[in-house]
Amino acid sequence: MAMKFEKVGDGKYMLDVCGYVCPHPQIYCKKSLEKMEEGDVLELIFDNPSSGETIVQMCDQAGHEILEKKEEGGKLIYMIEKG
Amino acid sequence: MENIEKRNQIWAFIVTGILILTSFLYYKVNVYYMYLIVYIWFGFAYGMMLQYGRFCMASASRDLFAAGVPRMAVGILIALIFFSLVGVVLSITNMSTFHPGPLGPHELIGGIIFGVGMVLAGGCASGSLYKIGEGNGTSILSIMGIAFGQAIFVDIGGVFNRLMPQSWMDRANATTWIPADKMTSWFDHFLAGYVFTKRQILLSETKVIKSLAGEGNIRYFIGDSLVNTIIPAAVVLLLIYYFYTRKGFIKKRKKKKGSTGLSDELAGIWNIITASQRTTMMGVLIGITAGIHILTMKGMQLRFGVNNFGQLLTRMGHSVDVSITGKVFDPGYWYITTQEAQFAGWIMEKVGWNVRDNVFFGVMNGLPELWRNPALWMSIGIIFGAMVMALLKKEFKFKLPKGELIIWGLGGGLLMGVGARVALGCNIGAFFIRVAGGDPGGWLFGLGMVLGGYAGVKFFNWWTERKMAKEMEAF
């Protein structure tokens, strides 16, 4: 099991933390956003529902916008635009 | 999608049905097991609420320090306030089973160890239980760490006894009410030579509060609720607002209105209370439920004319389950950790380890068969309650622990186990219950948890930064 943080396009990044439990998804999400530029989009893939509540509030407080939330095969996918 | 929903609902019914059937069978065997059934269903209710509110005390300090998110810290403060108010009513009506813990620096030290452990493990004692209900395998390891960490910690002696200060050893060995064959481990000497000499303080019973509020019932509100819970909780809430959310909130308001005043500050405080409605709502419900739980347990004790389930076990002929004082672990309220230690102790005894030759099992808590352990049934209720809620919300997913999570889960659990024994309780028994009950020592454990949590977050920040840097080499 390993986390993946990749640049998938111009201003687009992907963070896959499936298999990880608290606090890893929220910490990796925060650190990934810190590495990105304003306006860049992060596709966050995780499967630990307990982290979701914290990630939503963290984005709200930091001014990042969650563009889309979806669930696919037990995985949660959030598209987050850095604010 | 509909199929998954249907399947989850069926499983939720099956899990609930198993618990109903279990309760019915216990009742048929002996009416005394009503006592145990009450624990099962309060556990079930806690589990549902913990899962719904994502109520984990590890995230209170961890998410605050790691992500600047205060939702859980706020949820706990709300729960404390409501629990303390219900507690006042219970004290006034003489229906409380609460008793304060010995006050001393061991609570702070235990809290620090526990705090580091809960961040590493990814959940506190109650949080790890509800996460097992979500199918989280790492939490199973955490609970095993808590269980075996405690059981081994309280039983080891020999060379470890040399680590105890001589004054503790002398005082412990001079104790007359504990038989010499039960005073064997270092933990026994720590208890008898140090912890048992400490004062137990209930604010409503102190001279200061009695001189302020008199001998009447109002002293329960002034001492236990207002001074020990509501005012400190409000101060912590204000500190969280000031240091973590005020800047961003006021900036947004200024942008919108041009200037800000007191009403905006109040709106900012209200905003952190309502930012995560499900957590705050569960904080209120958990606080009230914890109070009703105490009331119900007291009712059970009055109904059967006992003050400990060990007396009922003895009446039913299971005297081998109880300690030499005729008791088993029966807190009379929400509690985690000691029952997990009994679970591990039970397994250790079955493989030939003598775990009854110490104060923890032999004198204080007994070692009942797992199916006759009331507090253990509360923990099982929490797992099942959380499982039902997770199934209904389509959030149940079994995940085997892999890689580094095995080390974090087990190591964090062991630290939580050790911390819980040093402080005589976990995030529930040593913090939540004690603070709301009027015991200032609960705040010492809470402070320790926060400090330990901070250290754990610092470590994880370093660890994740290292891994991120490796990933970014490819960019």
Image (cartoon, coloured by chain):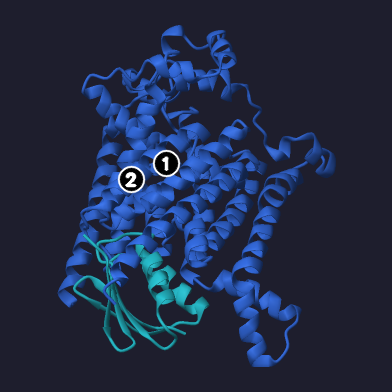
Residue at figure coordinates x 83%, y 43% from the top left: B212
- The amino acid type found where label 1 is placed reads Met
| View extreme (left): residue | B3
Q: Which residue is mark 1?
A: B416
Chain that appears cyan: A
- Label 2 close to label 1 by CB (< 8 Å): yes
Residue at (33% x, 56% y) in the render: B386
According to the image, label 2 marks what residue?
B142
Callout 2 secondary element: helix
**Which residue lies at the image location 65% right of the left edge and 58% below the top edge?**
B236
Q: Residue furthest front?
A: B473
- Name the disc covering residue B5, or none: none
Q: Secondary structure at mark 1?
A: helix
Q: Is disc 2 surrounded by few (<14), some (14 to 19) or many (20+) residues within 10 Å?
A: many
Question: As displayed, is residue B342 above or below residue A30?
Answer: above
Q: Chain drawn blue, letter?
A: B
10 Å neighbourhood of mark 1: few (<14), some, or many (≥20)? many
Left or right side of B214 for B11: left
Q: CA distance from mark 2 to mark 1?
A: 8 Å
Q: Locate the C terminus of chain B by quadrant.
A: bottom left
Residue A21 x %, y %: 32, 59
Horizontally, residue B303 falls left or right of residue B235, namely left
Badge 2 or badge 1: first in the primary sequence: 2
Quarter containing the N terminus of chain B? bottom left
Q: Which residue type does callout 2 highlight?
A: Ser
Q: Nearer the viewer, residue B290 or B125?
A: B125
- Position in image of residue A45 (x %, y %): 28, 73
Q: Is residue B123 above or below residue A67?
A: above
